[in-house]
Structures are given as C-alpha cells and as structure tokens.
Amino acid sequence: MSTREIISSGNELSAIAAVDAGCRFFGGYPITPSSEVMHTISDLLPEVGGACIQMEDEIAGIAAAIGAGMSGVRTMTATSGPGISLKAENLGLAQMAEVPLVVVNVMRGGPSTGLPTRVSQGDVAQAKNPSHGDYKSITVCAGTLAECYTETVRAFNLADRFMQPVFVLLDETLGHMHGKAMLPTVEEVAAGIVPRKSFGGSAEEYHPYGVAQDEAAVLNPMFQGYRYHFTGLHHDKNGFPTEEIETCRKLIDRLFRKVDEHTDEIELNEEYMLEDAEILLIGYGSAALAIKEAVNVLRAEGIKVGMFRPITLWPSPEKRMHDLGQKFDKVLTVELNMGQYLEEVQRCMGRLDIEKLIKVNGRPFSPADIIQKVKEL
C-alpha cells in the first residue's frame, strides 16, 4: 500500500479526509474544540467545486447538511458535545428518513458548557442514542492522528452503505494534537469509495423504502426523475406517512436489522500484545495512546498486559469482548469519563467485576496513571 506523509492536526486531517472521500458540502457552526474542522474544510471545498456554509447555529448547520444529503451529495457537519445536543432532533430525522451524513464530534468536558478547552470522552453514550426513538447508531472512534483521517473516510462509506448518520468521535487531545501521520494516497481513497445504491428502473417501479428487511433504503438523488417523500413520521415504501401497524413495525425493525445483520462490515478493533497477556486493558480514543505506552513499560518490567481497543464503538464488538471476558480474569477499562463504555463491557462480558480507571478533570491520562493502577491489581 502506497502512503503519503502529512504533518497536521487531527481536526485538520478529518477535514482533509472528508474532501478526499468525496464530501462536497459542509454545514456547521464553530464550537471549541472542533472549529478547525470547519475552518479547514471551508478552504478546501471551493477548490473542488464544493461548498461550506456557516449557519446561524448548530441546528441549522445539520439541517443544511441533511438537505445536501437528500440531493445525493456526500455531506458532513462537525461539532462538540453541546452541539450534538442541539442537533439531536435532526439526527433523529436523518435516522428515520435514512439520509447519509457524517458527523464529526470532537469531545470535550461536560455536562452543559463543561470544559470547552479540555479533553473528555463524555459523549460516548450520547453517540449511541443522540436522539429519541428506536434506531441503531454507527459510531467510529479515532485513536491516532492517522485514524482521524482514515476513520473519517470510512465513515463516509458506511454512511452511504447503511443510509444513516455515522459519528466520528475525536477528542480535544487528538483534535489539537499536531504531528506526522502516514496516510493512504488520494488515489487509493478514491478507489475505495463505496457509492450509495441507486435505482435505475421505471418511476412506477421505484419504492425507495420497499427493500429487504436487512437492507437500507435506496434513495435516488432528488430532481432526477423519481418521486418520493421524506418525512420524520413512520412511513410506507414510498416515504409517505402511515400508521398501519405492520408497516410501522417492519420499518423500525429494519432500522435495527440493516445494521445488526451486517456488523462484519462495520466492526474494527486493535489488539495489542494479547497473545500471552494475563491482564487485559480496554480503552479507546486518545486514552489508548497512554495505554499502549503503559503496556510497553509494564512488559519491560515483566508484567504481561495487553490492550483491546474498539475502533468501532457502536455497534460494540460484542462477540469479541465476550470471548475476551472468558479468557482474562483481570480486566481494566480506562476512560476519560465516569465509565460510559464500562457498562457495555460488563454487558458483553457478562461480568460485574471489571475494574475501571477514570479521569474527569479535563486532563489526559499519562502512562504513569495506568501503570500505577495495573500494579494495584
């Protein structure tokens, strides 16, 4: 695989990735610590015939991005936790109408205004259910500068494949970290683009939501000869509102099954030194950088530890975490929150004896924090 070297920040790399992946519209509103995503993409999009619009607020930002998605354009918005709170209603609309959209969330401290300039992983649970109702979220989480790029690219392909919003979680540490990243070439990214499905038959035969129970809607771009309806209401095969009991049941069931029955296309994890490990560390995002360094130090001291890092957080790697729970007696989760993913680890492993190391003061973990906790075990 050919690569290229870029020295940049995580936020900037996410914006570059979006353009390389074919994104041609960005609608958003600046908010710390995600603003550099919009700043960067606002320079890049006009050069490739795209458009970036700063709207009056976060709500309008995602509304504009959804509109672009309805027209068939690859589209993105970016924000931080409080912005996701404002975008929640429209995220529900995109889930119900099955409009593909990438949402970059550069996490900071909360609740409310919290710690705008400090790091947190406080939006993990929010990413699973950012809006009310029943649907299946897809959330990926970058853990390196390179992944700020590659996971953004992957998110666009997932959004078009499953026809729904896909979250890319960064955090303040990764978003503002500046360093060298080895990335795939633009040509390689372009060759790997997975376009959304389209219908090519007669208009009379086109039923965008009339698909198999484990598949996503097939929404041809607007203004191209096919007529259908977008709505946030329960709808029939043509998108028109209905309260017919079986149609409503099958619609919501399909929003789950289109994801649940294809997790092999979504799941991505990193396993580090697990082969002979006796203690398992689980972490994600920037916290995993400190975990990996701690593993190296502890290994040098003769303590056999290993790391499991879910890159796809939602849907969670349920089966793999269950298997790891059977293998390891000692398991430690490391999170920059009060343990939002710990509950999912407990569920998947079927255990309540999982240890945790948390930090919620806006400062990142150091390897020493993790080394000390492991030695206490």
Image (cartoon, rainbow, N blue to C red):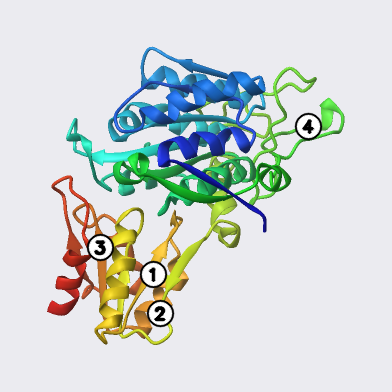
Kindly report the distance in space between the C-alpha atoms of the residues bearing marks 3 and 2: 16 Å
Q: What residue is drawn where x is 69% and y is 44%?
A: 193
Q: Amino acid at mark 4?
A: Tyr
Q: What residue is drawn where x is 22% and y is 73%?
A: 352
Characterize the local packing of mark 2: few (<14), some (14-19) or many (20 or more) Cα atoms within 10 angstroms.
Answer: some
| Mark 2 touches mark 4? (CB < 8 Å) | no
Viewer-proximal residue among 178 and 99: 178
Look at mark 3 in the image and give the residue it sits on: 334
Look at the picture and state if 199 lies above or below 162.
above
Q: Quadrant of the C terminus?
A: bottom left
Q: Amino acid at mark 3?
A: Val
Drawn side of residue 162 relative to residue 145, left or right: right
**Which tag, 4 or 3, sits closer to the chain's start?**
4
In percent of width and height, residue 10 lies at 41, 42
Look at mark 2 in the image and give the residue it sits on: 274
Q: Amino acid at mark 1?
A: Phe
Could you tell me if residue 377 is visible in this image? no
Viewer-proximal residue among 93 and 124: 124
Kindly report the distance in space between the C-alpha atoms of the residues bearing marks 4 and 3: 49 Å
Kindly report the distance in space between the C-alpha atoms of the residues bearing marks 3 and 1: 11 Å
Look at the picture and state if 102 lies above or below 125.
above
**Which tag, 2 or 4, sits closer to the chain's start?**
4
Q: What residue is drawn where x is 17% and y is 45%?
A: 362
Look at mark 4 in the image and give the residue it sits on: 206
In percent of width and height, residue 266 lies at 55, 56
Outermost residue on the top side: it is: 56
Characterize the local packing of mark 1: few (<14), some (14-19) or many (20 or more) Cα atoms within 10 angstroms.
Answer: many
Look at mark 1 in the image and give the residue it sits on: 308
Viewer-proximal residue among 77 and 210: 77
| Mark 1 touches mark 2? (CB < 8 Å) | yes
Q: For marks 4 and 3, give the one nearer the viewer.
A: 3
Characterize the local packing of mark 3: few (<14), some (14-19) or many (20 or more) Cα atoms within 10 angstroms.
Answer: many
